Image: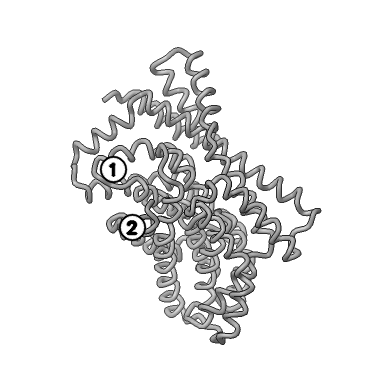
Amino acid sequence: MEYIPLLVLIISFVGLLAIGTPVAWSIAISSMLTLLVSMPMLPAFATISQRMATGLDSFALLAIPFFILSGELMNHGGIAHRLIAFAKTLVGALPGGLALINIISAMFMGAIAGSAMASASAMGSILGPEMEKEGYDKGFAVSVNITSATTGLVIPPSNILIVYSLASGGASIAALFLAGYIPGLITGLLLMAVAMFWAKKKGYGTGQRSSFKQVFKTFVDAVPSLFLLVLVIGGIVAGIFTATEASAIAVLYSLLLGFVYKQITIEKLPKIFLNASATTAVVMLLIAASMSMSWALSFEHIPQDISSGLLSITDNKIALLLIINLILLIVGIFMDITPAVLIFTPIFLPIVTKLGIDPVHFGIIMILNLCIGLCTPPVGSVLFVGVGVAKTSIEKVIRPLLPLFVAMILALFLITYIPELTLWLPSIFGL
């Protein structure tokens, strides 16, 4: 194994991050420096530029800006209030009712908007003050909001599942979307169990039990929002339209719903479009840079070398999945989820497929794993959004985060070692 390219890649990437270089540029520059080990400067520059451009030349990637815009429209369209009202009638009377409402609402919101940061922002700004008013510790309230927001990256429609499909060389987006439901629900249920235990321990109050009439009324109010899931996922699974076409339909539906709810006006649209464009630009730059690094890794035969190295340690499926999960947990602490998926999928996917693991199953394992990193410093984007919305500090959030991390890791291990939890739904639909 040739160690010099790998050392150049790691040292330059970590060094650039350490001096505050943006992640996308750190990825692109370290990729170029890695290529300089094996080729002259001009071809290295040209190759990286070309790979960044061609990396975005994919029809499937068009779904990402549309789903981002749909999420922005949902975030401004009065959706969150209706989902929270519905969740409140379902679990408001249980111990830690407001925390459970936060988790269920985040699962709904994340599934509809497809964005963990949008969910953390919406739930934090609406439910955070209410939880404080009811005597909840602010650190605990923020921890619940942060961890529950990540379930929306597993429950479809999810941009990161589309990114994984691209990185894996064509895993079915429809299969990935269906595969994410049960893992997302399991994660949410385990977070709810921890929240209930913590609430009982701390003596937090409960709300009033809702009547069937109240449950039905809030459900009817939430139905137009929840119908988006049926429209998008049902249309893809039924073969009526592709994921990209579904994302455009999601934008149109979200826009119409915002006008119907009278939460979106013509005057607000420029700001919504600007926010969506800014988010899209960041995501696309990350994807372009990550694609250049994936090519540089492949050119230097680094994935094959790592694969051979891991398989030389053990060919036991359980042990290798444990090692890969530990590596991804560490990666998630220091790298955002999009570049991590694009860079590490080509490295680990050939290993797990040799062991007979389905690419769809591995995709859910990888994303669920990296979701944990979104809640941890120093790069945890959802952590910073949650803390920023609540106007608190990371130090106050870390301790109540720990038991919720345990719940997420337990969900990860269940999904890793019981593949039926992931593959059952896709198999029912023949995917």
Q: Residues within 10 Å of mark 2 (few under 14, many from 20)?
A: many
Q: Visible in this render: residue 383? A: no
Cα gap from disc 1 to disc 2, whole angstroms: 15 Å
Residue 80 is left or right of residue 417, and the answer is right
Identify the secondary structure beneath mark 2.
helix
Question: Is 68 located above or below residue 211 in the figure?
Answer: above
Q: Quadrant of residue 178?
A: bottom left
State the residue at coordinates (58%, 56%). Answer: 113
Type of amino acid at the residue the image marks with label 2: Ile
Q: Which label belongs to residue 145?
A: none
According to the picture, the residue beneath numbered tag 2 turns out to be 415
- Mark 1 or 2 closer to N-term? 1
Type of amino acid at the residue the image marks with label 1: Val
Q: Position of residue 53 (x, y in %)?
A: 55, 27
Q: Position of residue 151 (x, y in %)?
A: 47, 59
Q: Nearer the viewer, residue 279 or 32?
A: 279
Given contact means CB atoms under 8 Å apart, are the residues at marks 1 and 2 in contact? Answer: no
Residue 430 is left or right of residue 205, and the answer is left
